[in-house]
Image: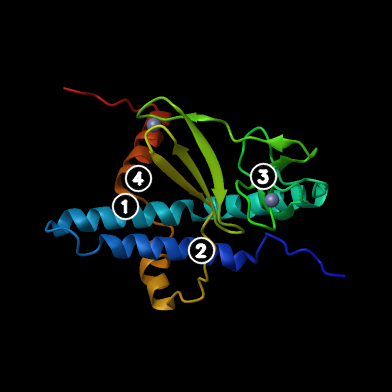
Amino acid sequence: MKTKAKLRKADSSYLDCYDSHTITLLQGISGESNNRDLEFDLHKTIAIQRANIKHLVVQEMMDSDEMKDLLIDKFRIPKHITCDVCGLPLRFCTYFFDMEDHPILFVFECLKGHLPRVLVDADGRRYDMPAQKCSDCGFDMTVSLEGLNDELTISHECHSCDKKIEDTVKADWTDFSQIKEEDRKEYCYSFAGQNLFFLSLFRLAEDLSQMGVEHVSG
Ligand SMILES: [Zn+2]
Ligand SMILES: [Zn+2]
């Protein structure tokens, strides 16, 4: 029997994902401006901040995937969903997790390619994305889902003025095995455990106030 692939990946995948973003972000800053001091400060601030929150963020990513796996195990894929255009049964293609009022939704598509794709909740009821008004003309925008699996693009389209907004969700599981270890050392590890200057000051002020030392001004 084929076992379902789990969304929860190895811990190292999440660390790689995080480090890879840190490296890209910091490399993007280097050499951009003429003010080297400012650039150095910005670089350092971001590097330390990213290093400080790393474990929190990584834990959150792991928890989120574990929660999704639980939801997938708990709810069965609804059956007998048919295409509004041709009436044939629709094929389940992926899950969608991020609507507040529905922790899990199922995305179905027609084998003949009739659009739009259909979202169904765990009870088998059709789910319509909340309608959005066009910010330019106030007309209702229609919503459609494109792309599958790790990348889902939600587009809102206005038929009155042709305005189109696209929103891509969870596109971010690329192969991070290409991370160079020297980059990781330079951009990630070397900043771990460091305090930002203003954070240190803030802590010092807190300590002093706990000891009853008041700041005297003037
Ligand atoms: Zn169809
Ligand atoms: Zn419009």
Q: Residues within 10 Å of mark 2 (few under 14, many from 20)?
A: some
Q: Amino acid at mark 4?
A: Ser
Q: Is residue 55 above or below residue 12?
A: above
Q: Residues within 10 Å of mark 1 (few under 14, many from 20)?
A: some
| Left or right of residue 7, residue 188 in this image | left
Mark 3 or mark 1: whose residue is earlier in sequence: 1
| Left or right of residue 167, residue 40 in this image | left
Do residues under tags 2 and 3 come within 8 Å of each other at their CB atoms? no
Q: Ligand 1 closer than 8 Å to the CB at disc 2?
A: no
Query: What is the distance, in whole Å, between disc 1 and disc 2 at their CAs?
Result: 20 Å
Disc 2 target residue? 17
Image disc number at residue 118: 3
Q: Amino acid at mark 1?
A: Thr
| Left or right of residue 158, residue 116 in this image | right
Image disc number at residue 200: 4
Label 1 secondary element = helix
